[in-house]
Image (cartoon, grey):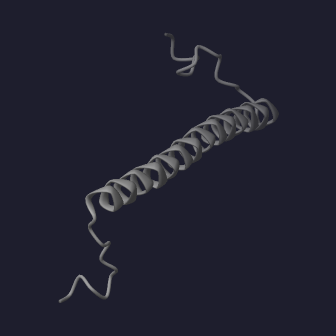
Amino acid sequence: MSDAEGRSGEAIPENAQDLTVFVQNLLEQMQQRFNQMSTAIIGRIDEMGSRIDDLEASISELMEQAGIEAEGPEDADK
């Protein structure tokens, strides 16, 4: 990589207008990556929430089968 190239292999602009376009493109790329990562993270959080709901339902079902009463938050302190 020469002194006139950036990390992506693109030539670093030499005048203000080219620099502005270069920075705008770079910011757009960063925004796209951020949006992709945000979407992926939100999807994983939703999936995790669904799994937790399923787990709670399974535990409740097992407790019912075993004849154990579920303790509420107020009962846990006793």
Residue 73's place in the image compared with 20, above or below, is below
Give the camera-side residue of 50 and 58: 58
Residue 69's place in the image compared with 41, above or below, is below
- From the viewer's perspective, tell me whether residue 49 is left or right of residue 29: left
For image coordinates 46% across by 49% down, the residue present is 54
For image coordinates 70% across by 37% down, the residue present is 23
For image coordinates 34% across by 80% down, the residue present is 72
Q: Position of residue 22 (x, y in %)?
A: 72, 30
For image coordinates 49% across by 10% down, the residue present is 1
Q: Position of residue 66 (x, y in %)?
A: 26, 58
Counting the numbered discs, the total is 0
Residue 54's place in the image compared with 1, above or below, is below
- From the viewer's perspective, tell me whether residue 48 is left or right of residue 78: right
Give the camera-side residue of 67 and 17: 67
- From the viewer's perspective, tell me whether residue 71 is left or right of residue 31: left
Give the camera-side residue of 53 and 28: 53
Residue 36, located in which quarter of the rendered image?
A: top right
Q: Position of residue 59 (x, y in %)?
A: 34, 55
Residue 15's place in the image compared with 68, above or below, is above
Q: Position of residue 52 (x, y in %)?
A: 43, 52
- Quadrant assignment for the C terminus: bottom left
